[in-house]
Amino acid sequence: MELTTNVEGKDAPVKAVDASMEAEDASVEAEDPALEAIRKAAESIVKNVIRDAIYTIRHLQKTEAVPGIKYPVPNITWMKCKDFTVFNGLAQIEDYLKTWELHESWLHWTNYISEEELEYSTRYFYRVRWSIPTCRKPIPRATACVYFVIEISKIRPSTLPVEVFFVVETNKLIHRPGESRFKEKWLKDVIESKIIMMETITF
């Protein structure tokens, strides 16, 4: 009880000063309507900032991995090996791209590149080129590519799903759908590094 009484006693002068300042501010605002308008505008800005901050934090909580917590990684049901065609592979990659959480400003173009015959499988290569065109720059300065590989086994049952993996341009890390959560930052890093490199080159 004594501790509480002492703390309140120490805070009393501060509270008195605060009350005095609030009364003075109210008096000034009453005399000057412009200050009242500024105060209301400031309150509105602060509320918007807080609202945006809460939205950002919630979004990060959903998209960023937290140690000890497992989040489901979006994926699709990939076709069986017997159903594979180059066109079907392209269509399924497009379906899978829809599970990525990217801003709507990103545009992409997917195309088939080539195939590679191995001893026990055949690999089909696709490229997805990403960019953010704008009204001022409809032709982007740089693009970022993601390379997909669909592998068809020659020894496993044809009723099993195809094997799929992908890599981001300039990155050697191999990702597999359903195991890796794609991050928009990967594309931004590639584009930013290309722009920085181009700016260092003089003709």
Image (cartoon, grey):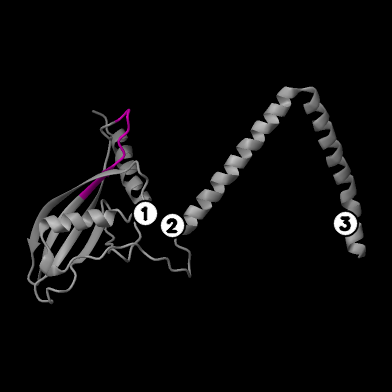
Q: CA distance from mark 1 to mark 3?
A: 50 Å
Q: Residue 63's mark?
A: 2
Give residue 150's position: percent from left, percent from top. Answer: 17, 62
Residue 146, x across and y down, in percent: 25, 52
Q: Quadrant of residue 171?
A: bottom left
Magenta residues (range): 128-137
Q: Is residue 192 above or below residue 39?
A: below
**Residue at horizontal 32 percent and vertical 66 percent from the top:** 179
Q: Main secondary structure of the magenta part?
A: loop
Residue contact between numbered discs 2 and 1, judged by CB atoms under 8 Å: yes
Q: Is residue 83 magenta?
A: no
The earlier-in-sequence mark between 2 and 1 is 2
Disc 3 crowd rating (10 Å Cα; few below 14, some 14-19, many 20+) is few
Q: Secondary structure at mark 1?
A: loop
Number of numbered markers: 3
Indicate left or right for 33 with 132 as reference: right
Residues under labels 2 and 1: Cα distance?
Answer: 9 Å
Q: Which residue is mark 3?
A: 7
Q: CA distance from mark 2 to mark 3?
A: 44 Å
- Verify CB contact (< 8 Å) between mark 2 and mark 3: no
Q: Earlier in the sequence, mark 1 or mark 3?
A: 3
Check disc 2 and report its element: helix, strand or loop. helix
| Image quarter of the C terminus | top left
User: On the picture, is 130 further left or further right than 154?
Assistant: right
Q: Quadrant of residue 131?
A: top left
Percent from the top left, x then y, of residue 4? Answer: 88, 61
Viewed as shown, does residue 101 lie left or right of 81? Answer: right
Disc 1 designates what residue?
183
* First in sequence: mark 2 vs mark 3: 3
Q: Secondary structure at mark 3?
A: helix
Callout 2 amino acid? Thr
